[in-house]
C-alpha cells in the first residue's frame, strides 16, 4: 500500500467514525472488517487519530542531528565570503567527519563552494582609479555603431604544455601510460615566436610574425604592423571612417613616429592618457589569443620548427569563427560602461 492509499484509507475510516458510526469504535471496526481491511489496521488508525487529532503522518524524531542549528549558523558565519578554508579544519572543533560538514552545508544551508575567478591585479589604487576613469572616457568617445579596432602581441612556443586542454590525460593504468602523455616536458629555453594581429568586427588583419628574440621596437612596429598590415586592413574594411583604434599600451605603440603616422593617415586612436591600463577583461583580443592557442595545440600538437609553428598559427587564425568575433567586439562598449559605473571587476 502506497502512502497516498494509506492516507486515503485513514481519511475514510476517520470520516466514517465521525459521521456514520457516531464516534463508535466497534461499529467502525465491524464495518471496515467486512471490506477485508485488517482489524489491527483499523484499530491503529483510530488510536492514532484519537491520540493526535489527525490522521496524517506526523514527523518522526529519527536520527539526531550531529550539528545543531546553532552550531551550523555559527559555521555559516565563519565561512561566508572567505577563502582558503578546509572542511577538515571546520570539522575538528565540531568533532565530526569532513563529509558531515559537507553534507550539512549542502543540504541545510545556502552556502555553495564557488571557484575564484581570474582578474587583473592593479599595481596601485591610483592605477585602478585611472583605469575606471578612462573606461568612462572611452565609452563616451565610442558611438553606438562605432567599429573598434584593437591590436596586441603574444608569444607562442613550439609545444603547448600550458594550454588547459593538454594539462590532463585519461588512463586506466598510469603505470602503462607513455612518457610523452604522462609528463609535460618543458625545455629550459624553448624557442618561441611573437605574433601581432589586429581585430575588429570585420575580422582579423594579416598576422605579423616576429622571429627575433628581441622585442618589437618602434621602427619594426611602424613598418611591419602599421604600414604593412593595419593601414591596409583599415582601407579594406573601414573605409567609411566610422572606427576607433585602441592600441596596446606598449611603449613602441605610442612612440612619436607611430603617432605621427597615425595622425598623417587620419586614423582616430585612443591617446596614451585616455587608454585604460591593465583591463584585459574589456579587450576581446585577449580571449581570442586563448581560443587560438587551444586550436593550435589541440590534441597535444607540437611543432618541430619555428616555420612549422608559424604555418600552423596562420592556418588556425583563418578558422576563427567570424560571428563569434563580431559578438565579442560588439560587447566591448557595454563592458566599458559597466566597468566605469560598477567597477573594473564587474565584468570579470
Image (cartoon, rainbow, N blue to C red):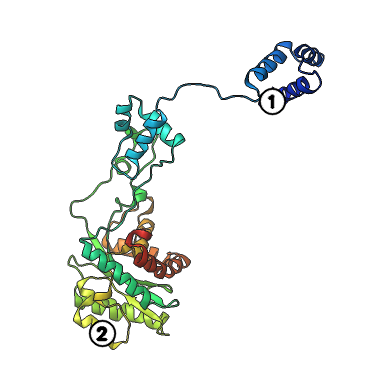
**Image marks 2 and 1: residues in contact by CB distance under 8 Å:** no
In the rendered image, the residue lying farthest to the bottom is 264
Image quarter of the C terminus? bottom left
- Rendered position, 202 above or below 93: below
Badge 2: few (under 14), some or many (20 or more) residues near its Cα, within 10 Å? some
Compare marks 2 and 1 and give the one earlier in the sequence. Answer: 1
Q: Is residue 239 left or right of residue 279?
A: right
Residue found at x 44% / y 76%: 144
Helix, strand or loop at disc 2?
A: helix
Report which quarter residue 9 is drawn in. top right
Residue 272 % position (x, y): 24, 75
Q: Which mark is residue 261?
A: 2
Residue placed most toward the observer, 57 or 22: 22
Residue placed most toward the observer, 142 or 153: 142
**Can see residue 283?**
no
Residue placed most toward the observer, 238 or 28: 28
Residue found at x 71% / y 22%: 10
Q: How far apart are the two marked residues, 2 and 1, measured between alpha carbons?
A: 86 Å
Residue 142 % position (x, y): 38, 77
Where does label 1 land, which residue?
Answer: 7
Amino acid at each position: 500500500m502506497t502512502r497516498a492509499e494509506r492516507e486515503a484509507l485513514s481519511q475514510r475510516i476517520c470520516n466514517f467514525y465521525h459521521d456514520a458510526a457516531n464516534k463508535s469504535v466497534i461499529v467502525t471496526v465491524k464495518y471496515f472488517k467486512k471490506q477485508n481491511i485488517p482489524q489491527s489496521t483499523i484499530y491503529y488508525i483510530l488510536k492514532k487519530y484519537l491520540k493526535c487529532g489527525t490522521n496524517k503522518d506526523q514527523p518522526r524524531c529519527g536520527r539526531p542531528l550531529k550539528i545543531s542549528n546553532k552550531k551550523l549558523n555559527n559555521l555559516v558565519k565563519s565561512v561566508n565570503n572567505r577563502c582558503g578554508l578546509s572542511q577538515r579544519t571546520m570539522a575538528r572543533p565540531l568533532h565530526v567527519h569532513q563529509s558531515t560538514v559537507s553534507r550539512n552545508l549542502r543540504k541545510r544551508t545556502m552556502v555553495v563552494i564557488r571557484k575564484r575567478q581570474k582578474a587583473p591585479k592593479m599595481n596601485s589604487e591610483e592605477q585602478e582609479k585611472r583605469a575606471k576613469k578612462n573606461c568612462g572616457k572611452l565609452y563616451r568617445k565610442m558611438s553606438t555603431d562605432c567599429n573598434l579596432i584593437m591590436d596586441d602581441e603574444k608569444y607562442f612556443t613550439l609545444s603547448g604544455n600550458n594550454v588547459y586542454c593538454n594539462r590532463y590525460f585519461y588512463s586506466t593504468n598510469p603505470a602503462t601510460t607513455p612518457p610523452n602523455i604522462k609528463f609535460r616536458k618543458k625545455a629550459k629555453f624553448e624557442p618561441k615566436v611573437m605574433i601581432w594581429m589586429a581585430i575588429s568586427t570585420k575580422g582579423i588583419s594579416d598576422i605579423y610574425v616576429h622571429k627575433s628574440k628581441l622585442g618589437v621596437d618602434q621602427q619594426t612596429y611602424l613598418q611591419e604592423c602599421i604600414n604593412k598590415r593595419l593601414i591596409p586592413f583599415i582601407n579594406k574594411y573601414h573605409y567609411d571612417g566610422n572606427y576607433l583604434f585602441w592600441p596596446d599600451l606598449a611603449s613602441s605603440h605610442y612612440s612619436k613616429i607611430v603617432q605621427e603616422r597615425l595622425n598623417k593617415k587620419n586614423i582616430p586612436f585612443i591617446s596614451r592618457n585616455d587608454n585604460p591600463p591593465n583591463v584585459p577583461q574589456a579587450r576581446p583580443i585577449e580571449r581570442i589569443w586563448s581560443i587560438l592557442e587551444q586550436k593550435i595545440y589541440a590534441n597535444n600538437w607540437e611543432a618541430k620548427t619555428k616555420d612549422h609553428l608559424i604555418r600552423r598559427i596562420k592556418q588556425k587564425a583563418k578558422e576563427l569563427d567570424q560571428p563569434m568575433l563580431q559578438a565579442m567586439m560588439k560587447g566591448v562598449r557595454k563592458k566599458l560602461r559597466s566597468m566605469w559605473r560598477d567597477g573594473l571587476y564587474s565584468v570579470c
